[in-house]
Amino acid sequence: MTQTYQDPTRKQLANPEDAASSSPSPLLLICFGIMGMGVLFPYNTLINCVDWYQHIHPEIDLVGQMASSMMTAILLTTISLLPISTVTFPPATRITVGFVLELGVLAYLAARVGETSTPPSVSLLKLLAVIVGFGDAMAQS
């Protein structure tokens, strides 16, 4: 006879259909909204300004290079995080690291708004795209 193990710490629902029909708490919805904005704001800060960056550097295809830099960083970060267990690198730590990186990029770009004398170089834009891609992958994994 086979016995199944039941975790004593798990809360048993009286009716499993109740869990599917209940709506999420407003606090949970607010947290997901903040997380979504925290991931999308730095990405949009770089991607929405690509036309201006392209005007500054007309000699190269900056749109493709920034998109490929960001997507490569997201892919490599996601692949590198797959074998790491959640015990050694818990999700809260990953989310914190991702948000700190993205807020750092936003702070840097906000500080550069007043500086109109020197536009950002191509290598700096690619580096910022890689950092945002890495932060996105960290926060979403």
Image (cartoon, rainbow, N blue to C red):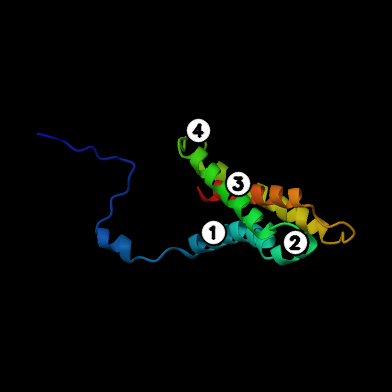
Quickly name the residue at label 3.
Answer: 134
In front of the other: label 3 or label 2? 2
The residue labelled by disc 2 is 53
Which residue appears farthest toward the left when viewing the image?
1
Q: Evaluate if marks 2 and 4 touch, with contact meaning CB atoms under 8 Å apart.
A: no
**What distance separates the C-alpha of mark 3 from that of mark 2?**
21 Å
Residue at point 46%, 38% (across, down): 86
Q: Judge by depth and name the residue closer to the eye, 121 or 3.
A: 121
From the top left corner, tell me how far across and down residue 16 is, in percent: 26, 58
Q: Secondary structure at mark 3?
A: helix
Label 1, on which residue? 31
- Closer to us: 127 or 40: 127
Three-letter amino acid code of the residue under disc 1:
Cys
19 left or right, relative to 42: left
Q: Nearer the viewer, residue 134 or 57?
A: 57
Q: Earlier in the sequence, mark 3 or mark 1?
A: 1
Give the residue pinned by disc 4: 88
Label located before the other in sequence (2 or 4): 2
**Which mark is first along the chain, 1 or 2?**
1
Q: Nearer the viewer, mark 1 or mark 4?
A: 4
